[in-house]
Image (cartoon, coloured by chain):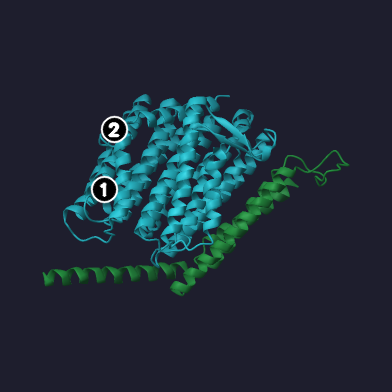
Chain colours: A cyan, B green
Amino acid sequence: MLALALGAPWFAAVALVFLDGRRRVVGLLAAAALAVNLGALIAVAVDVAGNGPYELVTGGWPSGVGISLRADALGVLFAALSSAVVLSALLYEVLSGVRGRLFPPLALFLVTGLTGLFLTGDLFNFFVFFELSMIAAYVLSVYGGERRQIGAAFIFAVVNLLGSFLFLIAVGAIYHVTGSLEMGAVARRFGDVDPASAILIAVTFFVAFGVKLGLFPFHFWLPPLYTGARPAVAAILAGALANIGSYGLIRFGAGLLPSELEFGAPVLLALGAASVIYGSIQALSRRAVAEVLAYSSIGQAGYILIALAVGGPVGYAAAVLYAVVNSVNKTLLFLAIGLRGWLVGAVFVVGAFSVTGIPPSAGFFGKVALFQAAVEQQSVALVALVFLGGALSFVYMFQIYQQDYWSGRETAGTLRAAPRAVALLVAAAVLGLGLWPEPLLALTTAAAEVLGSRGAP
Amino acid sequence: MIVLLSAVVAILFGSGAFLVLKPDLFRVVIGMVLISNAANLTLMASGLSRGSAPLHPLDEDRVADPLVQAMTLTAIVIGFGVTALLLALSYRVYTSHATVDLDDLSLREARREEQLDRERVERVERVEVEA
């Protein structure tokens, strides 16, 4: 199953590179490969939920020699989520007309990279898959955009490459101090490492993933990129690619370096709070919808950091849940802004409700988990911050709603019914997760338990 | 040895960072090449043992750590691909904006943005007049 999940998009991508992606058949073939990937990932998720995590050593090597793929609740959750996000964005774009011949295979390469990096048990393998998906993203970011898009894409590529090289340096450092690249072994041996070098490695990882996620001090590449990109690409970047950042922070922070995470918690709390407030206030002051959503992403990323800094089972579960919910929200909203016509306003409202955390949507549970984490910490300031952030997001989301959907002003966008159906489906998924959240909550709790058990020395 | 390597990595990374901060796109690309090589060198330096080449009939008991060499090789290939991509991107910038200067580029983009805004406003006004 693991091999199928990784192989299906990979081989399909290589084959589709030679075909013209503007033809609808090619796009649908790519969607079919992605559907196979998603189906295999869901099967793996069900298996992991029942029988616990399992490992697959590639090439039939004995364990410890070969590169291991490892499926546990946390990895599978993120992999399935990202695959679903890219699948909906791909369908949306195929149904509204693909503009470049490489779009479908690039989306497949991106998913291959994401599946690989979420399901790997090896640090260097993580880097290789990570680069695979990042390179696909660099090319996607110039897809079908206007001329001004290229400048933003160049800056995006350079800044994220810097993050990648920092990550590589940190991997080298980890290998040097622990003598292993296997995540389990690293987590076990990291307790004996000299604290001075340990904290240095932790900071390097934090910067590398902070850049990907677009946290407050590393965010400057993000707004121009999201603003200029086509809706489907923005949805992929905000909904799937940003998951690398949140997964990386959760896996490396809470899973591999828990004591360093605890040591750095005050700094993370401060940065997270700054991210929330800065993102919300900037979003409030913008008028263009894509720009508001871009700044909102920065703000939402702050919550993940706060939950991670609170730590413990409650904090980790909240971080995972919030990362998942945020990714679904952003996908929905970015897809909605490329549309107009009947029901699109309703789709947007579902997304807006979810960002602000109003009950029948998935976002509500994200916010509840955050409040739980804040109460756990017994900090009035945190509860107030989460509340303030929610209130601000309510204001900026409905400000753009009022401006774009109530005024009846004609906005640019496609009127076709098929892409709207995709957006409606995503909206239904957000509502569905809000109305029947047990599977998601069970998965996030299981994911947080993975971290707890591995982090223990 | 390790002091020498650290010094080289520091100089490479420093010069790379300096070049990345320049407004000229090609300098930025060269800077990224330098930084990627600094990372490769760090990876090489993080090997756990030093000795002869790790080929199969081992005649000495001390061999160099083969894992870091394999990793560096992979990283070099990735760095090479990324450099090609960055150069292609800068070429796209050059063909569509006729400049490789970032300051110049943002100026042109801002001007184009203004023009687009003006056109949009004019269109809306025309529609209102017609109505």
Q: Are marks 1 and 2 in contact (CB under 8 Å)?
A: no
| Residue occupying image coordinates x 39% and y 71% | B108
Q: Residue at x 44, y 37 (%)?
A: A268
Above or below, B111 against A271 in this view is below
The image shows residue B94, relative to residue A205, as above or below, that is below
Query: Which chain does the residue under circle 2 lie in?
Result: A
User: Seen from this angle, which residue lies furthest front?
Assistant: A25
Residue farthest along the bottom direction in this orientation: B98
Tell me the amino acid under the disc marked 2: Leu
Foreground disc of the pair 1, 2: 2
Q: Residue at x 72, y 50 (%)?
A: B4
**What chain does badge 1 belong to?**
A
Residue A152 vertical position relative to residue B116 in the rendered view, above or below = above
Q: Which mark is residue A348?
A: 1
Q: Secondary structure at mark 1?
A: helix
Tag 2 residue: A435
Q: In the structure shown, which secondary structural element does the residue marked by tag 2 occupy? A: helix
Q: Is residue A112 left or right of residue A387?
A: right
* Same chain, labels 1 and 2: yes
Residue type, mark 1 in image? Phe
Note whether residue A244 is visible: no
Q: Quadrant of residue A290?
A: bottom left
Whole-percent x, y for residue A220 in the image: 42, 54
**Observer-nearest of A251 and A145:** A145
